[in-house]
Amino acid sequence: MISIGLPNILKACLGYIVIILMDAIWLPFATYMEFYPKFDDTHILFAILAWMSIATLLSCGDVSSGKDAAIFGMYVGLIAYSTWNFTEATVHKEWRNTAILFDLTYGTLLCAFTGFVVYKIDSLIQI
């Protein structure tokens, strides 16, 4: 069963770490493979805020199994990344359909994975 509760700061911090580690692997690879257009000027502060927001929302899921944690994470990722990608496509014409497809898929899977990992670690150490 999945229900929504208040944020758990320790779970949010753990989720934040998982997201950063996965993005540290994915983003250079995806940029090298030209899944995304080149970025000339980035503002890391806004990325940090986005990662913190997603991790905090993931920590609100009150789930009873790893499967439920992954499903909740998948929904969070789908909503968060579709909102971002469709907004990006609206304001930047170079944000093409392949970038949307890759980023939306990656973000959905990332959040499902993060939710699952946080649940498993929590069940081991009872955060």
Image (cartoon, rainbow, N blue to C red):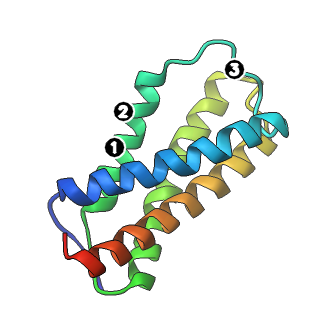
Q: Distance between the residues labelled 3 and 1?
A: 22 Å
Task: Give left or right: position of 82 versus 117.
Answer: right
- Looking at the picture, how far across and down is residue 122, in whole percent? 28, 73
Rendering quarter of residue 1: bottom left
Location of mark 1 (residue)? 53
Vertical relation: 77 (above or below) 72: above
Disc 2 + disc 1, Cβ < 8 Å = yes
Task: Give left or right: position of 101 versus 46.
Answer: right
Q: Distance between the residues labelled 2 and 1?
A: 6 Å
Q: What element carries label 2?
A: helix
At 43% from the left and 70% from the top, the residue drawn is: 117
Q: Is mark 3 on a helix, strand or loop?
A: loop
Bin the neighbour count of mark 1 within 10 Å (Cα to Cα): few under 14, some 14-19, many 20 and up.
Answer: some
The total of numbered circles placed on residues is 3
- Looking at the picture, how far across and down is residue 70, in whole percent? 46, 74
Location of mark 2 (residue)? 49
- Looking at the picture, how far across and down is residue 110, in whole percent? 55, 58
Vertical relation: 11 (above or below) 100: below
Q: Is mark 1 on a helix, strand or loop?
A: helix
Which labelled disc corresponds to residue 39?
3
